[in-house]
Image (spheres, grey):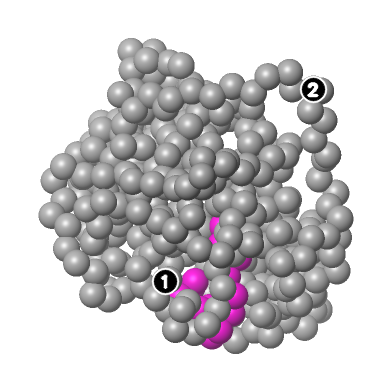
Amino acid sequence: MTENLSILGSTGSVGTQALEVVDELNIPVDALAANSNINLLEKQIRKFFPSKVCVYDEKSAKILKDNIKDTSTKVYSGMDGLCDIVSKNSSDTVLTSISGMIGLVPTLEAIKAKKNIALANKETLVVGGEIVTREAKKQGVKIFPVDSEHSAIFQCIQGIESPQDIKRLILTASGGPFFGKKLSELKNVTVHDALNHPNWTMGKKITIDSATMMNKGLEVIEAAWLFNMDPQQIDVIVHRESIIHSMVEFKDNAVLSQMGIPSMKVPIQYALTYPERKISSSQSLDFTKYNKLTFYEPDCETFKCLKICKDAIKIGGTMPTAVNAANEEAVSLFLNGKISFLQIQEIVEFIFKNHKPQKINSLYDILNTDENIKKLVLKKFNSN
Ligand code: MN3
């Protein structure tokens, strides 16, 4: 059970829900970090009294410093500030809920400072799985999944004595707003259409990733690292209702699932209270309201990113980093109206086909690949 928490990304979707959980469970907060939403961060400071905060954007950090002069909270900024506040805090657990691979370096810093990680930033494991899991082992810290699918699997495998008993993991996918659509129907979809997720309210990046199904691809890679599984043993099934959050099949063909109304509060809370369970303000599941649950094979012909991610983790090295970088840049171009929806997966596929993967020897190899791929995507696709 977490006794003191720090949150990276406290003004985002997971961050704000985590603070609700923290409030309900009376867990003290020592450090918070946000990108630039200083109005919300100020409210959080005045409610939770963290000793330090970091605002990634330097300009906003200066404004906030001035606005909270009357408090004892210290304001840091930039990547250095992020690393400072994750290593020098009195928390036993750091919740990493910043979006994108930018979460990698501060997560590693937190692990080196012997903090347990409540991981909501999947890109950290996608690009740095090898380094992050090795460092966590070395420092003797735990990584608790916050991603709902991974939390479900984590809950299903509690008490399993032998990892060999697990036959496969079955990640459920909602299918996103474009489930059942074919390529020709996706040509003209707008940012607004893509942001309209049927079951979950989330940040923009992950909502677009859900629409392209890249999110599920990233989650396969995340699951492979978190549960030390061969990617061949990780299957994806589309489950439109998002009631089953994922499943584990054992070698005797018994399947365990974790279910509930879609709410991030449950996985966030379990990551913080593990191995205990606490009463939650989330909604109870009324089975009679769901007279059927549906399951479909994912359409990998239309949504190419899922298969690309599966292939990328099999290839390994810098390939997952390259594919992730291509996607991060492509999603940002799409959100800014520079490219079409289908171009996101075309860019991811282009990088997958052209990147020459290298072995990862250090953090530098990851950061370098990320930077080069993003530059390449910008140069090649930002024209139209
Ligand atoms: Mn998820």
Q: Which residues are magenta?
A: 106-120
Q: Position of residue 114 (x, y in %)?
A: 55, 84
Q: Position of residue 260 (x, y in %)?
A: 72, 39
Can you say whether 333 is above or below 178 in the image? Answer: below
Q: Residue at x 35, y 60 (%)?
A: 127
- In space, the residues marked 2 and 1 are separated at their CA atoms by 42 Å
**From the image, which quarter does the C terminus lie in?**
top left
| Residue to which mark 2 is pinned | 289
| Residue to which mark 1 is pinned | 132
Q: Amino acid at mark 2?
A: Lys
Q: Amino acid at mark 1?
A: Val
Left or right of 198 in this view: 134 = left
| Nearer to me, 182 or 73 | 182
| Nearer to me, 381 or 302 | 302
Left or right of 346 in this view: 2 = right
Left or right of 5 in this view: 228 = left
- Point out the residue furthest to the front here: 252
Can you say whether 191 is above or below 15 in the image? Answer: above
* Residue 110 magenta-highlighted: yes
Q: Residues within 10 Å of mark 2 (few under 14, many from 20)?
A: few
- Residue 9 placement: quadrant: bottom right
Residue 113 seen in the figure? yes
Can you say whether 67 is above or below 145 in the image? Answer: below
Secondary structure found at label 1 = helix
Q: Residue at x 73, y 51 (%)?
A: 266
**From the image, which quarter does the N terminus lie in?**
bottom right
Mark in front: 2 vs 1: 2
Q: Residue at x 50, y 29 (%)?
A: 238
